[in-house]
Image (cartoon, grey):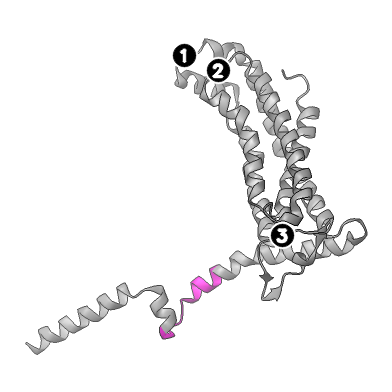
Amino acid sequence: MATNRGDTVSRNSVERARTESFSDRMASGVPLPRVGCREIELSIAPLSAAYELATTLAALLAPVGGAAAAVVVFTIAVRLLLHPLVRSAVRGEKARARLAPKVKEIKEPEELLKLYRDEGVSPFAGMLPMLAQIPFFLLCYQLFARSSVDGHANALLTEHVFGVPLNAHAWDARAWPVFAVLFAVLAVTAWVTARRSKRLAGDATGLIVKVAQVAPFTILISAAFLPLAAGMYLATSTAWSAAENAVLKRGLP
């Protein structure tokens, strides 16, 4: 009986340990596993490096806009870094345009995939430049969304553009004039992109074609909820895309 009772107590203790919540462990002073702490440190490391780069750039560009100019320069540097992916995507788009007459004759999706495979064309190559930008954009967002970095006050939050803090949002009354210019830039570039999508679609119809023409304007919704600095990143990047497409996609419809 004593043995069975001891086994029951032991099982209950194990069960309590398994169901003990994270907050309970924190409150009781039980240390967290070191692996988890190391993962947190590694996740912050890129942000710390980006912060050092941003503050250095802001200091160097202080005469021409400080941190606001640093955001633009950072965005242009990212787009230059990703330019080879864009060129590859444009080559794929030109190849798909060349195959358009054959595509119209295809009825089954499997046949279409086989055609692309035989011609060495990827239908998803155009998505790579956009997906590759996500980590850089998230870094820019975090730099102006955090009040502190590495335990120190975020000096970037003291930076302004035309008197508006770079961490301001569209609903701040004092930021409305600057955001109006930002939204105008985003709207123009979205219109250019949508217009080009419509030309490329030709006589094609369907949900995908309509989504491709509407999707560029969703960036305006995103900018309405982002800090000004992140909105500037989007505006610079989309303007760069419009200019890049105008140069690289000559000869396409």
Report the Cα–Cα distance between label 2 and label 1: 15 Å
User: Does 160 appear above or below 182?
Assistant: below
Residue 115, horizontal then vertical, whole percent = 54, 19
Residue with the mark numbered 1: 107
| View extreme (left): residue | 1
Q: Residues within 10 Å of mark 3 (few under 14, many from 20)?
A: many
- SS at mark 2? loop
Residue with the mark numbered 2: 205
| View extreme (right): residue | 63
Residue nearer the viewer, 15 or 229: 229
- The label nearer to you, 1 versus 3, is 3
- SS at mark 1? loop
User: Does 45 appear above or below 9?
Assistant: above
Q: What residue sits 31% from the left and 77% below the top? A: 17
- The label nearer to you, 3 versus 2, is 3
Report the Cα–Cα distance between label 3 and label 2: 41 Å
Q: What residue sits 70% from the left and 24% below the top? A: 195
Placement of the N terminus among the 4 image quadrants: bottom left
**Which amino acid, mark 2?**
Thr
Q: Can residue 84 be spotted in the picture?
A: yes
Placement of the C terminus among the 4 image quadrants: top right
Report the Cα–Cα distance between label 1 and label 3: 51 Å
The part of the image, by quadrant, that contains residue 161 is: bottom right
Residue with the mark numbered 3: 167
In the rendered structure, the answer to whether residue 135 lies left or right of residue 111 reads right
**Which amino acid, mark 1?**
Lys
